[in-house]
Amino acid sequence: MSTTTPEQRPADGPEPRRTRKDDHLRLAAEQWTGAGASAARRNEFDDLEFVHDALGGVDSDEVDLTASLGEWRWSSPFFINGMTGGTKQTTEINAQLARVARETGVPMACGSMSIALEDAEAAKGFAVLREENPDGFLFANVGAGRSADDAARAVELIAADGLQLHVNAVQETVMPEGSRDFSSWLRDVEDIVAHAGVPVVVKEVGFGLTRRALSRLADVGVQIADVGGRGGTDFLAIENARRQAGDYSFLTGYGQSAPACLLEAHADGHGSAAEIFGGPGGADGPDRGFVPTLLASGGVRNPLDVAKALALGASAVGVAGTFLDVVQRGGEEALSAVILDWQTKLRELLGLIGAGDVEAMRRTDVLVRGRLREYCELRGVDAARLARRAL
Ligand code: FNR
């Protein structure tokens, strides 16, 4: 157990924030590349399997990859998830990501803009996103705990189309300079949603939004949430590596995966969820209330992972670490090529699976195996229904 008390924690401010941004970039990259790579390894997307129908395919040229979320229409059902900005190095990465987003037409989010709200120089590291991609879809990003006024300023700074609002209690707990009081977050979220001026997506950063959190969010007016699950970039390991003292590695593996969160979120059979489980009443037990429209992220490594998340009812899928690795090693041309390749392969996959569009993925048969199946059993999610949706 850590002996660090709140008084002993290092102060947060512009300089520690700058260092943190660069640390995150370096430590996240190490998780995806080289001998120590862990994030690219097996995760719970591997517990999902499509049931092949050798004669059920559709023409992949006819497949429509449009993602629909409320009023938004995206030409791609995957996007560059929130990562960075605000230092010299991260501004350059942001500029590269913004040009890739412009070239490929994918939506993009930036990393937390807290630093930009206090430091005009750092703000330029975010403004570059709009300069490089004037017409693309862009998310601003702040954490719960910021005021509604801060959130509105972040949106304004980059003329954002939407706001990502991250809830990252596990990360804060392990972060040397992190906060330990999350008791006001739900109220903060409610306030920000009411005043942001654009639609808000509440997201986790790799520990999952489980059913209870999602229905709490729906209760305070959140219409879209990204389950942000475990299995990819590991912020527990990143923050632990930044600590001088007080090891938190005992928490390794904490949280739930994106597939687990999607499965239990949709298990009650409301609205589109009814479709996902092939009719109302996918879960045993009492009605646990509505959940927002869902995005998925955390551990997405390839187009098959994207397809699996869509099949579990995600409206679109966020990718951070996998794309960061590509851009850091090969530059923006390499990332543009990878994204265009994913779009082609995703279209082919939907064709192979027999889904003419993203919606149709929700009616495909999916087998849930291994640890994920055990999770379903423990949480009262009827995974057998997913295996027979198309019958
Ligand atoms: C992130 N992520 C993140 N999320 C957020 O909402 N605000 C932020 O400032 C950051 N910063 C950040 C930095 C770096 C270097 C990475 C790689 C990621 C979290 C990100 O959006 C995502 O939730 C997690 O990384 C899990 O997804 P992947 O990486 O497994 O695809």
Image: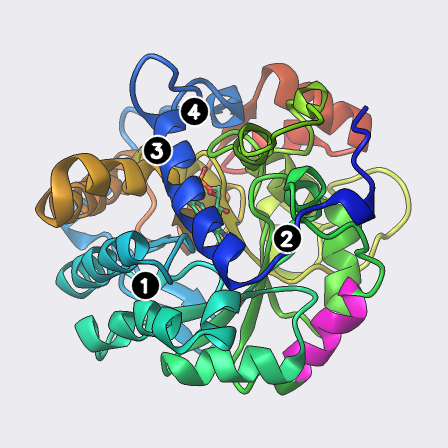
* Residue at numbered disc 4: 51
**For the residues bearing labels 3 and 4, Cβ distance under 8 angstroms:** no
* Residue at numbered disc 1: 107
Three-letter residue code for mark 3? Ala
Q: What is the CA distance from the residue labelled 4 to the residue labelled 1? A: 30 Å
* Residue at numbered disc 2: 273
Circle 4 crowding by C-alpha within 10 Å: few under 14, some 14–19, many from 20: some
Image location (x, y in percent) of residue 260: 63, 34
Q: What is the CA distance from the residue labelled 3 to the residue labelled 2? A: 36 Å
- Asked whether 190 falls inside the magenta stretch, the response is yes
Three-letter residue code for mark 4? Val
The disc, 3 or 1, on the residue closer to the chain's N-terminal end is 3
Circle 2 crowding by C-alpha within 10 Å: few under 14, some 14–19, many from 20: many
Residue 204 vs residue 172, the one in the foreground: 172
Image location (x, y in percent) of residue 134: 21, 79
Q: Is residue 385 left or right of residue 36?
A: right
Three-letter residue code for mark 1? Pro
The disc, 3 or 2, on the residue closer to the chain's N-terminal end is 3
Magenta-drawn segment: 185-194
Which element type, helix, strand or loop, lies under badge 1?
A: loop
The disc, 4 or 1, on the residue closer to the chain's N-terminal end is 4
* Residue at numbered disc 3: 29
